[in-house]
Image: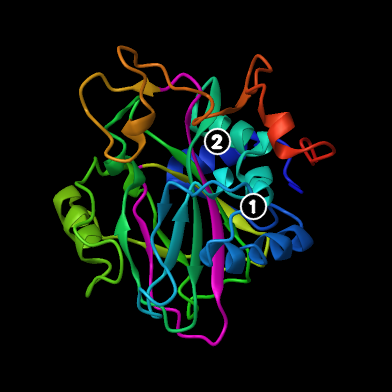
């Protein structure tokens, strides 16, 4: 599935300089098409494993058609999604880019921006991670359709991971001005923001730092823009003792800050460890290394 091997020195340097790293070919186009085909069943509530995802933010007949559709932790509901977001290469790259000894999943995102769908507000992922120690993420964003500036592709702000941490976005879905809070943060940092719109083929993507501002505009084309995101944290991450995550805090063990690998599996570590249940869960013959 994955076409990447290991990040080189120049990849790591560019990531740490810019706050993101574009990879033109992350996965095979055929794999991107297979994953995109899972979006329809998922948003209809057809969950292969029988388990609901942790967040299901758009439902047909309930929510407006011009909103971006989002599911979080579809890996628990669909093994095909799981084979991508829990892949060891994702963990390896996120760990190496972030400087961790290994990586585990924090959450995944299934994102579907149909024609006419409105913006997603600029934000920093780490603003939502105060329930984790260390409170930081590195993410792999995979385009399942070819992206374009007019199609509401993801946008990043060069070097914004060095601006400091801003509060969570006041309105994530369909804000009136999706760049407002980013511009306010840039003003506080005393910089003029440089926004980069990511245009890659299906199967291409980006790794981004948890403090890099990113968002997306309206899809003004007749084609959907679907993406799959694996948000990783350090393999050594633990729960914060007092800060509570209102969704993922439900998995915290009483009297412990340890993260249960059943809910936050380890994808890759320098010493070769990977959560033992993953091979069985993902199924015999899955593409664990390719």
Where residue 4 appears, as percent x and y from the top left, is 72, 44
**Disc 1 element:** loop
Q: Is residue 235 magenta?
A: yes
**Residue 219 appears in the rendering:** yes
Residue at the image point whose x is 67% and y is 30% from the top: 278
Dots 2, 1 in contact, CB < 8 A: no
Between the C-alphas of marks 2 and 1, the distance is 28 Å
Question: In the rendered image of this protein, does residue 218 appear above or below residue 168?
Answer: below
24 and 217: which one is in front? 217
Extreme residue in the right direction: 285
Q: Does the magenta stretch include residue 221?
A: yes
Residue at the extreme front of the image, as rendered: 50
Identify the mark at residue 94; answer none if there is no mark. Answer: 2
How many numbered marks does the figure carry? 2
Pick whichever of labels 2 and 1 is earlier in the sequence: 1
Report whether 238 appears left or right of 83.
left
Up the image or down, 225 lies above or below 272; here it is below
The mark closer to the camera, 2 or 1, is 1
Q: Which colour scheme is used?
A: rainbow
Residue in front for this viewpoint, 6 or 105: 105
Figure check: 250 above or below 228: above
Q: Name the residue under label 1.
A: 48
Counting from the top left corner in percent of width and height, residue 262 is at 54, 27
Span of residues in magenta: 211-237
Q: Is residue 200 left or right of residue 251?
A: right
Residue at point 23%, 55% (across, down)? 169
- Give the class, few, some or many, for how many residues have Cα within 10 Å of label 2's Cα (few <14, many ≥20): many
Q: What residue is shown at x 34% (from left), y 32% (from top)? A: 250
């Amino acid at each position: 599935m994955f076409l990447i091997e290991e990040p080189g020195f120049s990849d790591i340097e560019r990531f740490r300089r810019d706050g993101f790293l574009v990879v033109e070919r992350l996965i095979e186009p055929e794999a991107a098409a297979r994953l995109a085909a899972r979006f329809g069943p998922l948003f209809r509530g057809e969950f292969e494993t029988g388990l609901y995802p942790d967040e299901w933010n758009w439902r047909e007949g309930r929510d407006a058609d011009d909103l971006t559709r989002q599911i979080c932790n579809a890996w628990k509901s669909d093994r095909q999604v799981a084979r991508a977001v829990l892949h060891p290469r994702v963990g390896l790259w996120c760990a190496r880019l972030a400087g961790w000894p290994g990586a585990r999943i924090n959450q995944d995102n299934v994102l579907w921006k149909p024609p006419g769908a409105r913006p997603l507000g600029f934000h920093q992922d780490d603003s939502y991670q105060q329930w984790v120690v260390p409170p930081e993420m590195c993410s792999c964003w995979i385009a399942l359709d070819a992206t374009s500036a007019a199609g509401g592709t993801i946008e990043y702000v060069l070097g914004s991971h060095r601006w400091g941490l801003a509060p969570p976005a006041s309105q994530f879905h369909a804000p009136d001005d999706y760049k407002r809070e980013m511009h306010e943060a840039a003003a506080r940092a005393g910089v003029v923001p440089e926004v980069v719109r990511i245009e890659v083929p299906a199967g291409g993507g980006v790794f981004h730092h948890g403090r890099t501002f990113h968002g997306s505009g309206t899809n003004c084309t007749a084609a959907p823009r679907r993406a799959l995101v694996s948000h990783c944290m350090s393999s050594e991450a633990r729960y914060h003792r007092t800060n509570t995550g209102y969704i993922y805090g439900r998995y915290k063990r009483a009297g412990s800050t340890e993260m249960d690998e059943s809910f936050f599996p380890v994808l890759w570590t320098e010493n070769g460890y990977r959560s033992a249940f993953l091979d069985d869960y993902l199924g015999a013959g899955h593409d664990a290394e390719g």
